[in-house]
């Protein structure tokens, strides 16, 4: 059974989420009303996933996410936000969140998202993520050739990274490159390993930050 901790400063939201999740077979191991408490509860309960609000007292969700990732707890952070272009979500993704969902997400999709993140995958609404990043990242200076941070990648790996940043799923990448989905997964794993990234979300951010993919392009 997948386990979660719910971190949100509104008790009513926490209670509602607990009822929804427990009714669908998700184990709720604890709740937290601020980021510091979330870190403590996660450390004590070791859930598969923590549902992390952004705007919380004492310690916000971004700082809490950064600290949890730095500690290497193994608990994956799934950000729940009210607005799809919330300026704080970009910071959470950079801090190491595995993905994000809107609080208005239907219950079944929320549960599916939790299961996806618990399994070790990134939860991306690809076009939403692209919009978010383009909204909050400044254009990097022009680079001739391959950006230095990406020179460790092969040409095919950079091609895959571009498609990831453009919101393509593994299945869509496989179709576009005329390769198997297993081959795409191998490329993605090598990209993350070579660039020392925590997940697919961070790969998208890096693609924009280095100029491999241009905002608005």
Image: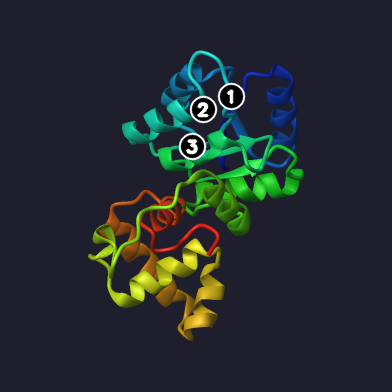
Question: Element at badge 3?
Answer: helix
**Of callouts 3 and 1, the N-terminal one:** 1
Q: Is residue 124 visible?
A: no
**Of callouts 3 and 2, the N-terminal one:** 2
Asked if disc 3 and disc 2 are in contact, CB closer than 8 Å, the reply is yes
| Residue at the (48%, 76%) spot, across then down | 181
Instruction: Give the labeled residue for mark 1.
Output: 55
Locate residue 161: give its quadrant. Answer: bottom left
| Residue at the (51%, 57%) spot, across then down | 215
Count numbered badges in the picture. Answer: 3
Name above or below for residue 109 compared with residue 152.
above
Residue 190 image position (x, y, % from top left): 31, 65
Asked if residue 194 lies left or right of residue 74, the reply is: left
Which color scheme did the rendering employ for the protein?
rainbow
Instruction: Give the labeled residue for mark 3.
Output: 92
| Residue at the (54%, 81%) spot, across then down | 175
Locate residue 84: give its quadrant. Answer: top right
* Badge 2: residue crowd in 10 Å (few <14, some 14–19, many ≥20): many
Asked if disc 2 and disc 1 are in contact, CB closer than 8 Å, the reply is yes
* Badge 3: residue crowd in 10 Å (few <14, some 14–19, many ≥20): many
Q: CA distance from mark 3 to mark 1?
A: 11 Å
Name above or below for residue 94 compared with residue 195.
above
Residue 68 image label = none
Q: Is residue 161 visible?
A: yes
Residue 33 image position (x, y, % from top left): 59, 17
Residue 4 image position (x, y, % from top left): 56, 34
Question: Element at badge 1?
Answer: loop
Instruction: Give the labeled residue for mark 2.
Output: 61
**Of callouts 2 and 1, the N-terminal one:** 1
Q: CA distance from mark 3 to mark 2?
A: 7 Å
């Amino acid at each position: 059974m997948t386990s979660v901790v719910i971190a949100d400063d509104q008790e009513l939201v926490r209670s509602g989420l607990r009822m929804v999740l427990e009714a669908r077979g998700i184990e709720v191991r604890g709740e937290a009303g601020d980021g510091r408490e979330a870190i403590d509860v996660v450390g004590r309960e070791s859930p598969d996933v923590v549902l992390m609000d952004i705007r919380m007292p004492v310690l916000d969700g971004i700082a809490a996410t950064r600290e949890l990732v730095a500690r290497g707890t193994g608990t994956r952070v799934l950000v729940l936000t009210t607005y799809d272009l919330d300026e704080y979500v970009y910071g959470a993704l950079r801090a190491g969140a595995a993905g994000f969902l809107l609080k208005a997400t239907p219950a079944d999709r929320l549960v599916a998202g939790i299961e996806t993140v618990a399994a070790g995958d990134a939860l991306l609404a690809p076009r939403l993520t692209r919009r978010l990043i383009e909204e909050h990242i400044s254009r990097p200076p022009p680079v001739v050739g391959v950006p230095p941070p990406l020179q460790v990648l092969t040409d095919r790996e950079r091609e895959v990274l571009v498609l990831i940043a453009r919101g393509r799923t593994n299945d869509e990448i496989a179709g576009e490159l005329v390769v198997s989905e297993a081959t795409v997964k191998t490329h993605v794993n090598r990209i993350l390993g070579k660039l020392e990234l925590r997940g697919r979300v961070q790969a998208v951010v890096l693609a924009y930050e280095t100029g491999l993919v241009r905002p608005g392009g």
